[in-house]
């Protein structure tokens, strides 16, 4: 069990919204209400925190998710509608994004996932899509493939049910060893799986053989080294 300080001060763990492993024995923790990132160094072969240092104060407004790729920490600076890249020491290296609906633009980017080649997926929550960028922050493609703003998050048939492959308010994501992207489709109350190019593969609300899996507003997801999947939704974590 990892336990960090909660008292006031630079090392305080207050209002965490996202975290990731950031290299050997290091965590990056985003603090939404404090508009900063906390770097946590762990003791070798244990979960004991031995050093904590805050960075990015003054650069962020309502940051939410965080990822780590090719030695850099990537933060979804949600209320500024962009993503920032930092070194592990906290130096600002670059940024990408801006408010809008076009390729590479965001409406409240939320969470991040990284692929095996260093590319980054960003859940563009209020645009009802995910965007994939190369390690330098250049836009590559939308998820789902063929995303169009006129159809995003909507129910064209008027049934109240989103078609498979459409997203409504996507949040937490994770890429498995085959670079398949698992997406918490929060507004759709389900988890969906896509290829990194955006092709839809599977949705948890498939009713085939009566084996659909029900979620309520899933927000976070992880996959461990044994392939077990952890989904956070409705004040609980479900393991598959």
Image (tube, rainbow, N blue to C red):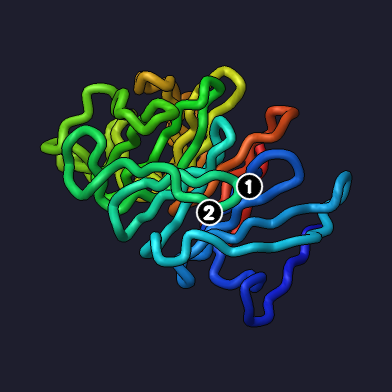
Q: Name the residue located 46 percent from the left edge and 25 percent from the top edge.
A: 208
Labelled disc at residue 121: none
Q: In this view, does 61 lie above or below 141?
A: below
x%, y% of residue 107? 25, 50
x%, y% of residue 173? 49, 39
Residue 163 visible? The answer is yes
x%, y% of residue 76? 41, 50
Please state if 82 lies on the left or on the right of 103 as rendered.
right
Q: Check contact, mark 1 vs mark 2: CB within 8 A.
A: yes
Residue marked by disc 2: 233
Ranked by sequence position, the earlier of labels 1 and 2 is: 2
Q: Name the residue located 48 percent from the left edge and 59 percent from the top edge.
A: 56
x%, y% of residue 92? 45, 49
Residue extending farthest to the bottom is: 8
- Distance, label 1 to label 2, CA atoms, is 8 Å
Front position in the image: 216 or 98: 98
Residue marked by disc 1: 238
Callout 1: helix, strand or loop? strand
**Classed neighbour count for the residue bearing mark 2: other residues with Cα under 10 Å, few (<14), some (14–19), many (≥20):** some
**Classed neighbour count for the residue bearing mark 1: other residues with Cα under 10 Å, few (<14), some (14–19), many (≥20):** few
Q: Name the residue located 19 percent from the left edge and 42 percent from the top edge.
A: 154
Quadrant of the rendered image containing residue 223: top right
Residue 172 visible? The answer is no
Please state if 182 lies on the left or on the right of 14 as rendered.
left
Front position in the image: 185 or 51: 51
Q: In which quarter of the image is the C terminus?
A: top right
Q: In which quarter of the image is the N terminus?
A: bottom right
Front position in the image: 205 or 188: 188
Callout 2: helix, strand or loop? strand
Residue extending farthest to the left is: 150
Please state if 215 lies on the left or on the right of 60 as rendered.
right
């Amino acid at each position: 069990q990892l336990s960090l300080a909660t008292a006031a001060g630079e090392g305080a763990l207050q209002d965490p919204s996202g975290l990731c492993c950031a290299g050997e024995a290091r965590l990056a923790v985003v603090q939404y209400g404090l508009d900063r990132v906390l770097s946590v160094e762990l003791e070798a072969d244990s979960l004991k925190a031995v050093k904590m240092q805050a960075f990015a104060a003054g650069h962020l407004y309502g940051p939410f998710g965080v990822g780590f790729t090719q030695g850099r920490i990537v933060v979804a600076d949600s209320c500024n509608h962009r993503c920032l890249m930092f070194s592990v020491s906290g130096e600002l290296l670059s940024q990408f994004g801006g408010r809008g609906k076009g390729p590479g633009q965001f409406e409240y980017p939320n969470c991040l996932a990284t692929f095996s080649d260093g590319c980054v997926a960003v859940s563009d929550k209020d645009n009802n899509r995910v965007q994939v960028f190369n390690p330098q922050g250049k836009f590559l493609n939308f998820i789902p493939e063929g995303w169009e703003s006129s159809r995003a998050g909507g129910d064209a048939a008027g049934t109240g049910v989103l078609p498979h492959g459409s997203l409504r308010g996507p949040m937490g994501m994770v890429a498995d060893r085959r670079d398949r992207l698992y997406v918490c489709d929060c507004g759709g109350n389900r988890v969906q799986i896509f290829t990194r190019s955006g092709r839809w593969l599977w949705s948890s609300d498939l009713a085939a053989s009566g084996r659909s899996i029900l979620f309520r507003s899933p927000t976070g997801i992880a996959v461990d080294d044994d392939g077990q999947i952890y989904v956070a939704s409705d004040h609980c974590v479900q393991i598959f």
